[in-house]
Each structure stands twice: as C-alpha cells, then as structure tokens.
Amino acid sequence: MSAVGTVRRAAERVLEVVCAALMIGLAIVVGLAVVFRYSGASLVWYDEVTPIILAWLTYYGAALAALRRAHLGFPGLVAAAPVGFRIPALIVSETLVVGFFLVVAWYGWQVVQLLAGNTLISLPWVPVSLTQSVIPLGALLIALAEVLTIPERWQEARSGGQLAEHEETPL
Amino acid sequence: MSILLALVALFVLVLIDVPIAVALGVIAVTAMVASAGMGDLLTVAITMFTGATKFPLIAIPLFVLAGAIMNTSGISRRLIAFASALFGFVRGGLAMVNIGTSMFFAEISGSAVADVAAIGSILMPAMVKKGYPKEFAAAITSSSASLAIIIPPSIPMILYAVMANTSVVQLFVAGIIPGLLGAAGLAALAWWFAVRYDYPVEEVFRLSRVWVTFKDAAWAFLLPLIILGGIFGGFVTATEGAGLAVFAALFIGLVIYREVDLPQLYRALVDGAVQTSVVMLLVATSAVLGLYLTETRVPQLLTQGIIGLTQNTYLVLLMLNALFLVLGCFLHGAAAIILVVPIVMPIVNTLGIDPVHFGLIVTLNLAIGQQTPPVASVLITACSIAKADVWEVTKVNVWFIGVLAAVLILVTYVPIIPLALVEYFYR
C-alpha cells in the first residue's frame, strides 16, 4: 500500500472510533435525559449539549464521509464524459472543495479566538472555544481527507474507469 | 452576483460533480464576498456551526442507529417470519410478505434505504429461489421500502419539519393514512401480477403458525408501541422517542434475542454516523446559502412571481409536484428538501396551504424520487442486492411507481386524507 493509502486508512480508523463514540454518546445523553425528566430532575445541560454533539458528529462524520467519498453529488455526467473533460472537471471540483473548507477552517479559527473566555451557560466550566473548535478542526480534516482521495480520483479520471459509488444516505 | 448567475453556477458545479453541500457553500460564500466583502465570512463560519445544531435533527442519527440495531439483532428475520405466516397464503405470498414486513419496519426505522437493505437481503433471494423474476422481486422490495418514509417515524419528515418550521409529530400522524393506502395499493397490484404470471402461494394459512411467529416476534412489536405510542401519546418528543428506540432495540437484541453481532453493530454505528453527517453537512451549508437568499429576498420574489401568474392552489400544487418529481430523478431526497422547501414555503404559506399537508406531498414525491433513475437511492440499493439491471427493474417498477403517484394525487387534492387524524387529535 502507498504512503497516501496508509495515511488514509489510519485516518479512517481514527475517525471511525470518534464517530462511533459520538453516536453512542448522543444516544446515551438522550436516553438519560428521558430518565431524569421522568424522575423529576431534568438535566439542565441537555438542550445545550446535545446539539453540540450533533455538530461534532456532523463535521467529524463529514471528514470520514470525504475519505469514503460518500458526499452527495451528481457523478453521472462526469462519469459518462471523455477523459478530456474529466480531468479539468476533477481539478476544478477538488480545488473548490479543498479551498472552501480551508476558508471555513480559517474563519472558524478566527471565531474560536473571538469567543475565547466565553463558556456554556449550563456548564460554566466548558469553554465555548472548545465546542466551536469543531468548525476549524472539522473543516481542516475534511480538506485533508479530500486531498488524500485525490490520487484515487486522478487515477479513475485518467483511466476512464467507473467512479466510486456514493454511499447511500438514510432517506 | 445576480440570482440567475448564482443559480446557473450552482447547476454547473453540481454537474461537474462538486458535492452538493460544497456547491451550496461556494455559491453562498462567493455571493456574500461579492456583495459585502470578506467581513461576512466570520458569519459563514458561525452559521456552519449553528446550522448543524438544529435540535429536532438529533432524531436522525438515532433513528438510523435504531434501524441498524434491528438489522443486527434478528428483529427483521422475526418480522419476516410473522408476515409470512400472516400473508403467505395469498397468491404471490412473498410479495405480500415483503409489503407487510416493510410496513412493520417502517414503524420503527424511518429510512427506506435501511428497510430495503434489511428486508431485501433476506426476501429477494428467497423470491428468486421460488421462481419470481428478479426484476419483479427488486421492484416490489424497492417500492414497498419507500413506505418507510411515509409511515411514521420518517427521517425526511424530520428534515422537512425543520426546514418548514412545522410540527414533526403532526407530520408523523399525517403519514399514517397515506402509508396504509400506499401499502394497500402496492399489495393489490402485486396480487394482480401474481395472478397474471402465476406466482406461487407461500404457505397454507394456519392460526397456530401465526401465533408461534407472533410470540417469537412479540418483543419486536413493542418497538413501534414504545416509539409511536410515546411520541403520539405526548410522553416523549420525537428526539426522545428516537433515543428510546435505540435502547429498546438494544435491549431486545442483547437481552431477549441475544443475537446482536457486535462487529456488525460497530460497522452500523460508523455507517450511520457517515450517513447522518452527509445530510447534516448539507443542512449546514444550506443555512449559509439561506443567509444569501434572505438578503436577496429570493423566496419572496419567487412567491410574487408565482402569485402573479396564478393564485389557483390546485395549479400551484400541480407545479410544485412537477418540480419535485423532476428534481427527484436527479437529486437525492435530502438535497431536494434542503434546497427547495425553504424557497417554496412562502408560496405555500401565502396560498394558505397547510404546511403539514404540504409536508406529506413532499414526502410522497421523495418516495417516488427514490424509485426514479438515474438518482434513485432505494431502487439502486435493491438492484445492487438483487444483482439486477436498474432499467430492467424500472420497466416493472413503473407500475408500482404508478401506485405511489396515485396516492400522491389523492393526498394533494383530497387534503382530508393526510389531515383527518391530525385534525382529530391535535386541532
């Protein structure tokens, strides 16, 4: 396996563990919230923390989805086009994806710095900069994940092979 | 950047296979920089976070997880055995079992892709073995799987509720009658096929077998009771109901049936996270696009344009149905909801169309969109499991799509069908 392949596989493993942990965490928090509500002691942090877990799941999951090339798109036209169209389309597409997430990462980092010193309302010991860190970190990871898939995409575009199937979403 | 230029650019980016979520973000960011400079990009970063924190959407990963646990814990197999005892005596019995099991599954999972993966992998090989053409097996499995998003709970309904700012629970209730109508229509058509092509009867009806399989699946039947009873009874919210579904499915799988395959469950957890994040990233970048749309007043301008053309509700609904049907052929359901619903809701509200009623119309359009190639998530999953050609299956499936279209027309023009239970229980 090439160096890029090795890094890609390792990144996939780590992100899989993070995503599984976030899914389990989300289910446990929601389950606990019901139990506590019915026992007359509602969790005050429930409404503030669960959306944050969802946001973390969104961005770390999106990085994993980028590694797996699972983001929703319309590959039909490019797949059917000649190589002379595929290569420029791939270059434009990858530049936009990586560029967009680098911009989001940079401005996300500015937001984290602006929010330094703020804390969650229900959990004053949790800094908002920690919860918001998912934007710069997640966006950077998505950009990196996209870069790691470029050799495979490039190979496919040049060889005229079938583009990888998009993973099915739950709808 | 003019609105038209933005739309054309979005179309071009999607055509060259830029992920839809990124295409939305790129267009929004470019437009915002063009109109207000780089300063607004801080707002983009903040919106990318807040857009992914909409509370009702927490139910999506949880329903995905509940469905995954069902698949790994023998619940699907027991549901199939019970449906076989109940419906297997009819001509074309396995097709009826397919529809019946999809209905049970629909009451727990809310995802048509999860439904087709769980049921199709067991029933389609069985149907082919019994002499059904694989194209018919894939078509009936695919079209009945789409009942999962009509019968509550339903992931697209949760997404619609957030985008249209309406009640998830009322949408769930509104889905019951159209879902039952769809199931009855699919069963009638499958029976007609079975009689015409002499498909086999599965087994003789025996009450004792119904009882034995019911007892075996009884714990599984508790799941819809917990989820739907809890949500409709007002004991839990839709999100909490989804959380309960996860724990109930885990309890049944681990303690009662003792069949949970842990490595498979881990894979399901990770796959569920990926599937959720793909939809959620779209939601987040669409929130950024929403900033641009609000600034340029696109929904309001579109509303004025449409209202200027006609104020006939029936005609507008016909146009919206046509729009969703065309989009359904080329866009994934989540993308269609996220892109179109915020733009057309002002029209819907201006004409006084009930947002719950419109939600059912959108859901039925998506159910059809899941069956219409080239982008047909459920049909393609079914064909992939059955190893059948998508276009050959579509030749058969077009009849079943016709049933779903008939339900769509009924729901569109006879609003009492989706709204009767909502009116009775909530208004």
Image (cartoon, rainbow, N blue to C red):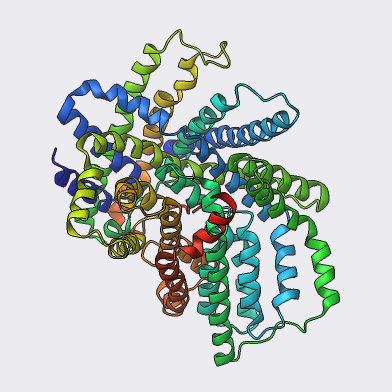
Report x, y in % for residue B175.
53, 59
Taking the image as shown, residue B349 lies to the left or right of residue A30, namely: left
Along the line of sight, the residue nearer the viewer: B255 or B413: B413
Q: Quadrant of residue B307?
A: bottom left
Along the line of sight, the residue nearer the viewer: B267 or B215: B215
Report x, y in % for residue A54.
52, 33
Decide if residue A93 is in sight here: yes
Taking the image as shown, residue B347 lies to the left or right of residue B111, namely: left
Identify the residue at horizontal 60%, vertical 54% (top origin). B109
Along the line of sight, the residue nearer the viewer: A129 or B58: B58
Identify the residue at horizontal 41%, vertical 36% (top origin). A145
How many numbered markers are drawn? 0
Decide if residue B19 is in sight here: no
Report x, y in % for residue B264.
66, 49
**In which quadrant will I find the N terminus of chain B?**
top left
Identify the residue at horizontal 27%, vertical 62% (top origin). B312
Taking the image as shown, residue B147 lies to the left or right of residue B321, namely: right
Report x, y in % for residue B372.
39, 67
Q: Up-down: is A136 above or below B231? A: above
Q: Up-down: is B387 above or below A22? A: below
Identify the residue at horizontal 61%, vertical 71% (top origin). B99
Along the line of sight, the residue nearer the viewer: B125 or A23: A23
